[in-house]
Image (cartoon, rainbow, N blue to C red):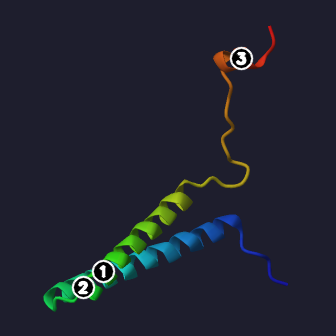
């Protein structure tokens, strides 16, 4: 029986797939915009723009998964004296 992948391993998979997507879509977009502008094809240019949007989306995924904490390592919000003054009765 196989063990399910760990949280960290799944996080690494998400980052790797997103980086591959950034590289592929970046190249695809550059080629599409370049060839589209040379041949005056609006559809190729806008396909390249769409690829740029996908690169931004994949970049956000990489940023998000780099910032995510492991289970149990989340930071709790501490309440200071000022906040507690509003919470506790006088």
Q: Please name the residue shown 44% across and 78% down the image.
A: 21
Q: Are marks 2 and 1 in contact (CB under 8 Å)?
A: yes
| Rendering coords of residue 89 (x, y %) | 81, 12
| Rendering coords of residue 61 (x, y %) | 51, 65
Tell which tag, 1 or 3, sits nearer the viewer. Answer: 1
- Where is mark 3, residue-wise? 86
Q: Total label count?
A: 3
Q: Quadrant of residue 48?
A: bottom left
| Rendering coords of residue 67 (x, y %) | 54, 54
- Where is mark 1, residue-wise? 46
- Where is mark 2, residue-wise? 42
* 24 shown above or below 53: below
| Rendering coords of residue 45 (x, y %) | 26, 82
* 37 shown above or below 52: below
For the C terminus, the quadrant is top right
Q: Please name the residue shown 57% across and 71% down the image.
A: 14
Indicate the secondary structure of the residue bearing disc 3: helix
Q: Please report whichever mark, 1 or 3, sits nearer to the chain's N-terminal start.
A: 1
Q: Residue furthest right?
A: 1
What is the distance, in whole Å, between disc 2 and disc 1 at their CAs? 6 Å
Q: Residue furthest front?
A: 42
């Amino acid at each position: 029986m196989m063990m399910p992948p760990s949280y960290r391993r799944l996080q690494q998979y998400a980052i790797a797939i997103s980086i591959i997507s950034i590289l592929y879509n970046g190249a695809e977009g550059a080629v599409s915009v370049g060839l589209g502008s040379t041949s005056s094809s609006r559809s190729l240019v806008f396909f390249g723009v769409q690829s740029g949007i996908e690169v931004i989306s994949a970049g956000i995924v990489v940023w998000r998964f780099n910032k995510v904490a492991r289970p149990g390592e989340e930071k709790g919000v501490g309440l200071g004296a000022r906040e507690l003054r509003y919470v506790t009765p006088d």
